[in-house]
Image (tube, rainbow, N blue to C red):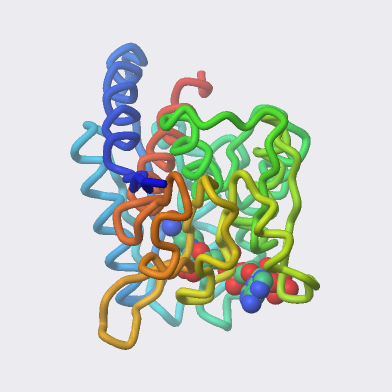
Amino acid sequence: MSMTLLKGAPAARALQDKLSSRIQACGKEICLAVIRVGDNPDDCSYERSILKKCEQLGIMARTVTLDAACTPKQLKTEVANLNEDVTVHGVIVMRPLPKHLEEVRIEELVSPCKDVDAMHPQNLAAAFLGENGFAPCTAEAVMQLLEHAEVTLKGKHAVVIGRSPVVGRPLAMLLLQRDATVTVCHSKTENLKELCKQADILVCAAGQAKMVDASYIKPGAVVMDVGIHVDAGGQLCGDVDRDAVGEKASLLTPVPGGVGTVTGWILMEHVVRAAEEQA
Ligand code: NDP
């Protein structure tokens, strides 16, 4: 059997094209605000990648940078101001926040209609109930890739390894909405391998480098690798050991260049949708 790499770039490009048309049709200047506390290198790098995408699409980006030692009140005030500002359509707060800000419960502060990063409980509930709202970007990115590759989900068995609130759980709900039969696995799951071997679609979001090898794969399965790690040789890799999986899968998302390539564009889709839906 021959395995095809399901790369993220074509799906990302298609999404980008659709967004450009929607932005034009929207007829207003769309603005995303990015709040960053401190200078954590990962946050700075993520912020840069968001700003670049905004620039590519012609979305205005407003950055709010707070001192690492800022008070909970300062952070709350910034978020409240952006919630009130009708020229700002989406707000994203870089997380995790420094320890001393944990009391802020930031996920409940950003107005649900501007919560493009999908952290507000109202948006998570919408994803759970299949209602309109913003679902976590990574979960939506997996769905976008499956749709772009025209993978049949109806009636198929999807196994998701991972039950985190940002990836595994919402993804299980999105797959269920598309009429897949879903099994969610986690670190306490017994017979993990046996369950995975029954999957027509296997989503690997355990956060364990190269954990999944050929012995987890049903021949012909579609394998979506969400994990991102740096291996011993300093190379990026996923939860799937690509070399070990060999030709057993029919489709496999590469790391890098798979799910992660689409995730940032889903965030942009949320920003555009937020602007469309805000009067
Ligand atoms: P978490 O650590 O929050 O969750 C991991 C989940 O996997 C948990 O539910 C855990 O189970 C389960 N798990 C851990 N080890 C095993 C195991 N050996 N067998 C079965 N299940 C296991 O991670 P995230 O969900 O936030 O992220 C998952 C991966 O995806 C990470 O590598 C992360 O870097 C990557 N990621 C990629 C993104 C992208 O855009 N491509 C975006 C976000 C994350 P339990 O609940 O029992 O602890």
Corner quadrant of residue 9: top left
Q: Residue 263, percent across and down?
A: 41, 48
- In the rendered view, would you say 153 is above or below 142? above
> Outermost residue toward the front?
1
From the viewer's perspective, tell me whether residue 209 is left or right of residue 196. left
Q: Residue at x 42, y 30 (%)?
A: 148
Front residue of this view, candidates 175 and 78: 175
* Rendered location of residue 143, percent (x, y): 53, 38
Asked where in the image residue 72 lies, by quadrant, the reply is: bottom right
116 and 229: which is toward the camera: 229
Q: Does residue 128 lie above or below 42 as drawn?
A: above
Q: In this view, does 109 lie to the left or right of 31?
A: right
Residue occupying image coordinates x 19% and y 37%: 56
Task: Return the x and y of residue 117 as percentages of the image width and height.
Answer: 51, 48
Q: Residue at x 32, y 88 (%)?
A: 232
> Can you say whether 199 is above or below 11 in the image?
below
Q: Which residue is drawn at 51% across and 79% down?
A: 98
Q: In this view, does 61 lie above or below 34?
A: above
